[in-house]
Image (spheres, rainbow, N blue to C red):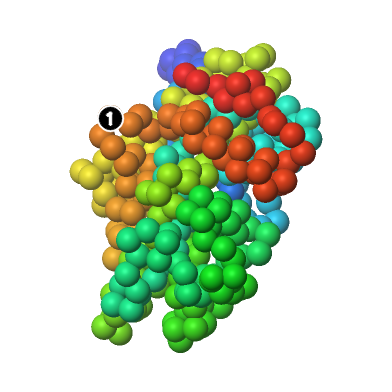
């Protein structure tokens, strides 16, 4: 009997060792987001919670973003291996010599749009901006995009009223501002819901629909990691795209909502469902568009807009930055 017990303990010990060895095969990485945990990062969270990262041999620590977080800086310092940044952040950083690369573009349509009341304002084109009060975050991407629209459609700044916006939406609710910048799949849905309950109808003005493509969130890594650990980069990208594809699949809607609710307990489920539907249209606007595909034309346009508005000193060699899979 004593020999049997000894063999039993040896067997258990071997199983434990094997388990430890298996855990050692899981590669830990840090992924710094640009935004807080909400519907806009549903695919990132879904890839973790539903096991896509683990299936690809990765243990990913997803870190929230926010105004005080800078994924580019953290990758440069080695605090993170992957991150999310908008195209303007990437282009500015590369113009200053940052060794970062883009491995996927999450949003095919920029979620930064303008909300307006459709019963008080008809917008067939930006030409209808004349005489209207336009909300802008001075120094923000919405200012850059709006100035591009004004120039493209020959609208002088003297023919519109530019209103400096803050986090308080009261001027829009009170009707002092005709168009207010929002992320259409986040606070845009919340504002829409509030006004609909008050009997008002709203629409969203998308610059993308009028030929102004300013790339939003994309997934980044370091040039060093891409060249020296390409297999790990490939597996991370595959897992992330898998997570986004699954999260956006209509048949997985309730699973996706449940994942978001684990991290965002303050937003009502019905609002999350509407946000999820809006996000789906921004990530995959056409059935043939692959999730995560990099729109080189849109990146070139974004860089040209920044150059025209003197936001960068000179052209950026995007062909060395954008990694097409």
Of 211 and 88, nearer the camera is 211
Query: Where residue 166 appears, x then y in whole percent?
Result: 61, 73
Note whether residue 15 is visible: no
Query: Where residue 269 appears, x then y in whole percent?
Result: 32, 64
Q: Residue at x 44, y 84 (%)?
A: 175
When the figure is inspected, residue 236 is found, relative to residue 140, above or below; the finding is: above
From the image, tell me which residue sits under label 1: 288
Of 129 and 2, nearer the camera is 129
When the figure is inspected, residue 240 is found, relative to residue 153, above or below; the finding is: above
Residue 59, quarter of picture: top right
Residue ranking furthest to the left: 251
Q: Residue at x 56, y 32 (%)?
A: 300
When the figure is inspected, residue 45 is found, relative to residue 171, above or below; the finding is: above
Query: Where residue 108 appears, x then y in whole percent?
Result: 42, 40
Q: Residue at x 57, y 63 (%)?
A: 156
Of 323 and 15, nearer the camera is 323
């Amino acid at each position: 009997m004593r020999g049997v017990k000894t063999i039993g303990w040896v067997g258990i010990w071997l199983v434990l060792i094997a388990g430890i060895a298996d855990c050692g095969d899981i590669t830990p990485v840090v992924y710094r987001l640009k935004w807080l945990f909400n519907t806009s990062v549903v695919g990132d969270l879904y890839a973790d919670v539903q096991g896509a990262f683990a299936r690809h041999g990765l243990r990913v620590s997803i870190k929230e973003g926010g105004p005080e977080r800078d994924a580019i800086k953290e990758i440069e310092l080695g605090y993170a291996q992957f991150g999310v940044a908008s195209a303007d952040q990437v282009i500015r950083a590369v113009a200053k010599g940052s060794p970062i690369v883009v491995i996927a573009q999450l949003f095919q349509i920029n979620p930064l749009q303008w909300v307006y009341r459709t019963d008080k304002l008809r917008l067939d084109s930006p030409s209808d901006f004349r005489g209207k009060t336009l909300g802008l975050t001075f120094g923000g991407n919405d200012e850059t995009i709006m100035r591009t629209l004004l120039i493209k459609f020959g609208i002088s700044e003297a023919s519109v009223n530019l209103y400096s916006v803050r986090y308080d939406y009261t001027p829009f609710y009170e009707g002092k501002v005709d168009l207010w910048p929002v992320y259409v799949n986040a606070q845009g849905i919340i504002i829409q819901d509030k006004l609909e309950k008050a009997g008002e109808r709203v629409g969203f003005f998308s610059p993308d629909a009028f030929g102004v493509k300013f790339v939003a969130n994309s997934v980044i890594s370091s040039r060093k990691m891409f060249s020296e650990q390409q297999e790990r980069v490939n597996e991370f990208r595959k897992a992330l795209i898998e997570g986004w594809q699954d999260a956006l699949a209509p048949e997985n809607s309730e699973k996706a909502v449940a994942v978001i609710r684990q991290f965002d307990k303050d937003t009502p489920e019905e609002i999350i469902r509407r946000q999820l539907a809006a996000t789906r249209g921004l990530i995959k606007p056409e059935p043939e568009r692959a999730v995560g595909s990099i729109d080189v034309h849109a990146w070139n346009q974004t860089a040209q807009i920044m150059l025209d508005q003197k936001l960068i000193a000179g052209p950026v060699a995007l062909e060395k930055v954008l990694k097409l899979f």
